[in-house]
């Protein structure tokens, strides 16, 4: 599953917006946010021509929300339901094979 460059850039921008939102919330609570390091980012070392984005001055929660529906982790109920479904299909397949081998010749004759 290949992820496009545009999708990766969009995710990086969402992470930066989320970090800016976290910094504002930390500042509201009275603690000093972590300062960004002076080291260049890994993308800059690889020849990225993009300048780093500055966090927005005021970020609303609606702008910073990540598309949770798209990236939501499957729940254990969904995984269990998929396992049961696969097992039932397997059993039905075996029953069909046995019917074709042993039962169908009796109906034809």
Image: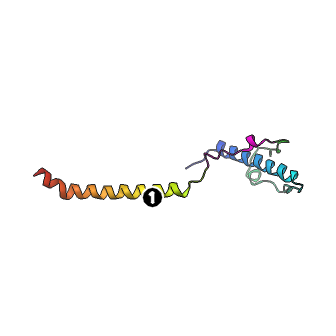
Instruction: Please state which of residues 102 and 50 is positioned toward the viewer in this rendering.
Output: 102
Instruction: Please state which of residues 41 and 70 is positioned toward the viewer in this rendering.
Output: 70
> Horizontally, is 15 left or right of 35 in the view?
left
> Horizontally, is 97 left or right of 63 in the view?
left
Callout count: 1
Provide the major secondary structure of the magenta segment: loop
Local crowd at mark 1 within 10 Å, few (<14), some, or many (≥20)?
few
Magenta highlight range: 59-71
Instruction: Please state which of residues 34 and 87 is positioned toward the viewer in this rendering.
Output: 87
Picture quarter containing residue 92?
bottom left
> Horizontally, is 108 left or right of 40 in the view?
left
At a point 14% along the width and 51% down the height, the residue shown is 107
Residue 77 lies, with reference to residue 4, above or below; the image says below
**Any magenta on residue 66?**
yes
> Horizontally, is 79 left or right of 19 in the view?
left
Is disc 1 placed on a helix, strand or loop? helix
**Any magenta on residue 29?**
no
Instruction: Please state which of residues 50 and 61 is positioned toward the viewer in this rendering.
Output: 61
**Residue 40 in picture, x, y percent from top left:** 81, 54
**Residue 94 in picture, x, y percent from top left:** 30, 59
Residue 77 lies, with reference to residue 62, above or below; the image says below
**Residue 38 in picture, x, y percent from top left:** 86, 56
Q: Which residue is mark 1?
A: 83
At a point 67% along the width and 46% down the height, the residue shown is 8
**Residue 71 in picture, x, y percent from top left:** 62, 49
């Amino acid at each position: 599953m290949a992820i496009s460059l545009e999708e990766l850039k969009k995710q990086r921008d969402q992470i930066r917006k989320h970090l800016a939102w976290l910094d504002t919330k930390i500042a509201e609570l009275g603690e000093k946010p972590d300062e960004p390091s002076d080291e260049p980012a890994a993308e800059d070392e690889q020849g990225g021509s993009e300048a780093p984005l500055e966090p927005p001055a005021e970020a609303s929660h609606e702008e910073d929300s990540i598309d949770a529906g798209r990236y939501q982790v499957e729940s254990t109920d969904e995984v269990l339901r998929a396992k049961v479904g696969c097992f039932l299909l397997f059993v039905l397949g075996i029953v069909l094979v046995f019917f074709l081998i042993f039962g169908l010749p009796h109906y034809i004759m």
